[in-house]
Image: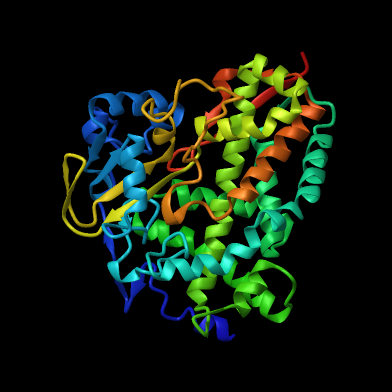
Amino acid sequence: MAVENRFAHDRWEKRDGESVGTVSEIVTDPVSDWAADFSHLAPEWSADVYPILDDLRQRCPIARTERFGGGWLPTRYEDVAAIAHDTEHFSSRSVIMGNFRPPRDLAPIGGSPPITSDPPFHHDARKLLLPTFTKAAVGRREASTRALCHSLIDAFDGRDVVDAANDYAQHIPIRVIADLLGFPPEDGPQFRQFVKNRLEGINLPQQERVTRMSALFHYLLTQVNNHLENPRDDLTTFLINAELRGQKLQASHIVGTMMLLLIAGMDTTWSAIGASLWHLARNPEDRRRLVAEPELLPTAVEEFLRAYAPVTMARLVKQDMYFGGVDMKADDWILLSFPAANRDPAQFDRADDVIIDRQINQHAAFGLGIHRCLGSHLARMELRVALETWLERIPDFSLDDPSAVTWSTGQVRGPRMLPLRIGA
């Protein structure tokens, strides 16, 4: 097929038989000093990252690590915002901090445009997708999303305890994104594995990473070829037919964008849904208020996004520079912690308190700058509808066993197991 030929010189991991980019030594030692040796893969980060970020903000606002080839972790809102807006000194060619750095010549397109694209290419690549994610376009998906949420709760079938992460939250964005791309909904279990491989396998040996990514690559290639043979009204067919600057999209652009939507559009949203349900299970006063005042839910959704922002993004330093009191070197990682920015007391009153009727809430959960989340309207709709439906159907619930709750590792943080007891 023609589309397969367009992938013949893929630049992700190998070119002319040799590795490209930089592979760093794998480090799994426990963290002894978060200011000088942080790791977003550490179990403490997964279990409860906020005390770590609060401590760093007070004593070392930009932390350092030599892991993953060296990187920085700003924890103040002003520093996170400054870096997010500065495309002259920081590149987005890789947004996942791990032991592999893609080559510099991957910019300005990157592997998953537009999120990995630098200006000026980023503007055109993002503009291409905007019509799919307008409020009006998202609104047309609300009824089917609500019906899905009801069907998932119907499937609880009278159980007293359900895993709200695996039995509810994960299924919602999987189905929405699958419908958006025109993928078979029954492939959901594969999607979950793809997400885990991409976001949580960042410290694996290079060849194992390549093998895992190959499974996703070939799945997406199969979907592209299927759409070539059977065009339909979905985003995949749109990307195949789309033109950018007068030319058809490169195959790597098509698959990279599909990969972005599949990975980022799923894990971030199911994490936000799960974290919100976790909060309501632990805080019955908030749960009861939202049941009694459902009109407050859109405001509460914004607060849940602020307080439990699931996403941390990475950047790469373009050239040696001095920033925020530290000397950064070319190709150092920058881990942009939007959760840290959202808990900065210099930016938010009572920053560590979850206030479901908070009125002034300019949070950074969807990022800042030119890479602010393209799918924010879609994510908000899914989160609001998921919570509305749950609270309508299950007004009384609590944590069945707090110690059984587990959280993901890496740059997207949300519950992976969330056993909830239904009923008073």
Is residue 301 shown above or below 208? above
Q: Quadrant of residue 402?
A: top right
Spot occupied by residue 17 in the image (x, y as percentages of width and height)? 32, 76
Q: Residue at x 68, y 45 (%)?
A: 381
**Snapshot colouring:** rainbow
> Exactly how many numbered labels are in the figure?
0
Is residue 279 shown above or below 203? above
Near-viewer residue (383 or 361): 361
Near-viewer residue (410 or 352): 352
User: 233 left or right of 280?
Assistant: right
Q: Residue at x 67, y 80 (%)?
A: 228
Spot occupied by residue 363 in the image (x, y as percentages of width and height)? 49, 37
User: 328 left or right of 49?
Assistant: left
The quadrant the C terminus occupies is top right
Spot occupied by residue 344 in the image (x, y as percentages of width and height)? 38, 29
Q: Is residue 318 visible?
A: yes
Is residue 394 shown above or below 266? above
User: 309 left or right of 105?
Assistant: right
The quadrant the N terminus occupies is bottom right
Q: Residue at x 59, y 78 (%)?
A: 242
Spot occupied by residue 220 in the image (x, y as percentages of width and height)? 58, 67
User: 41 left or right of 194?
Assistant: left
Q: Is residue 417 visible?
A: no
Q: Quadrant of residue 337?
A: top left
Q: Residue at x 67, y 15 (%)?
A: 284
Q: Quadrant of residue 275?
A: top right
